[in-house]
Amino acid sequence: MTVETKAKPDEKPAKITSKPCNRVKIAAPYAYVEELVVSSPNERNWRGIFIALLVIVAVLGLIIFSIVLVSPPEEGPRTKGNKPSLEDIFIKLPPPARFNGTWLTESEFVYKDEHGGVTLYNADNLTTRIIMTNSTFRQYDAADFRISNDLRYVLLICEVTKMYKYTTLAKYYIYEIQTRIRKPLSPKELDDKAPFLQYASWSPDGTAVVFVYNNDIYYKPKVEKDLVCRITNTGKQNILYNGVPDWLYENEILRTSHTVWFSPNSLYLLYITFNDTAVGEYKYPWYESNNPKITYPKVKSFRFPTVETPNPEVTVWMVNLTRPKYLFPVELKPTNSVETGSYITSASFLGEQNVAIIWLNRHQNVSVILTCKPRYNYNCTDSITKIPIGVVVAPAQFEAPGRGCSPTHDGDSIYCKHCPPARRTCLDEQAVTVANSQLGSGYGVEADSVTSSRPPLNSILPCIFCADGTINPVSSTRNRALRFHHVFLCYLTSAPFICSILISNSDMNDN
């Protein structure tokens, strides 16, 4: 750095030499002031925006709080739980809650109570008595039960597998209520394992059991003993059925899980055999939904007759159970009035030994009722032959001792009343009755007039029953025979049709 000094006029200027130094630049005062003026307004705007946002948030919070405070509480969704799946629809879940009671006597029935136990209800004195607690069902994981009429034993039904609409496979155990001992029900004597059975039921006296295994019928005469008697040995899977219906009769005709019945005195057994050998086979693919590893379907089949193809061959059998070691089924052959290929719509006991069978031709316009009695070696005879005036769809429902039939309702207005079981009206053997529930009265018609469009005037009998359920006396000139009416005719239009068929069973108890 060099600094020159100003010398006087007579002196030379002097030079002062020094080492260079760092220059320092000093900003002017006005520059700093200008910078302060520019930055100060920006700082105040950000602060104002922040405050404004806080105010807005506070106002919104107050509004939301007010809405929540004033609004009523939420009731929740209209539907709760899981949504129904396609599988739930196909397997018809959940099932409706139905009454599960079973009558044992004229005044007592058993049912499964709300706690899961078995309770006996007496309708005479309106009292209940616990037969079994729910602990037994939980212990053996029983899905259902069937109790004997003497209240000593219970059939515990476990591991139920549904086959078709009515038939099932299940394991059955005989449970003694007093001793709490459980034994498996098996076709093998002294078997400690319970196989899957197609059906099992108590005898009316509660001492014997009949069951179906692999399409064959077995009989256990004493549940406390080991003896098991095999009644049939012709059963074949998907071909020949004893005591259980095939696919056609199960789903379309009888609509039941079994075709074997005890007589009221437990001394006889009635069963039906279905032979599907000549029936065409229908095959369909079946996918196993429970096993994801199986990607290919199985091929299942059932036999089902189509138009102009053979129907199942149906045979009705009767067995005398008085000598369990010598059981010989007797065939109840149809008469010549029954056409080939006809259906059986009903088979039941009338009284202690007599049997009634209803046959229906393939065109379903002719029905034949057969009665089979032991005094004729169970050779069936025609009780009512060929009634070609309609389709019979509902079999007669007989009162337990076999003295009469229960009412049958056809349509919305016609109520075909049967004669009360405790009363025998003075009617001809060929007399019939019909009632209209709206009119509340009934009249009798001669069966000989069924071929005409309307009953002739001279065939109208006095009022047999009225709206209050009482029976008016019939003219004394018509008391030649005490019979129940055979057929109910309903005259809704100009042409008559059959509501229901009854059987004259006033002489059925004659052996």
Image (tube, grey):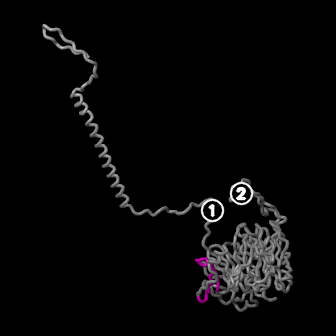
Q: Is residue 369 visible?
A: no
- Residue receiving disc 1: 89
Q: Which numbered disc flags the more N-terminal residue, 1 or 2?
A: 1
Look at 32% across and 49% down and name the residue there.
56
Of 48 and 357, which appears nearest the observer? 48
Residue 382: x and y, percent?
Answer: 82, 79
Magenta part of the chain: 108-125
Q: Quadrant of residue 455?
A: bottom right
- Residue receiving disc 2: 287
Residue type indicated by callout 2: Tyr
* View extreme (top): residue: 10
Residue 465: x and y, percent?
Answer: 65, 85
Q: Quadrant of residue 447?
A: bottom right
Residue 412: x and y, percent?
Answer: 62, 73
Indicate the secondary structure of the residue bearing disc 1.
Answer: helix
Of 477 and 126, which appears nearest the observer? 126
Q: Is residue 69 left or right of residue 120?
A: left
Q: Is residue 72 left or right of residue 19?
A: right
Q: CA distance from mark 1 to mark 2?
A: 17 Å
Q: Are the residues flagged by discs 1 and 2 in contact, CB closer than 8 Å?
A: no
Of 106 and 138, which appears nearest the observer? 138
Residue type indicated by callout 1: Ile
Relative height, residue 214 to residue 443 (above, below):
above
- For the N terminus, the image quarter is top left
Residue depth check, mark 1 versus mark 2: number of the one nearer the observer: 2
Residue 410: x and y, percent?
Answer: 66, 74
- For the C terminus, the image quarter is bottom right
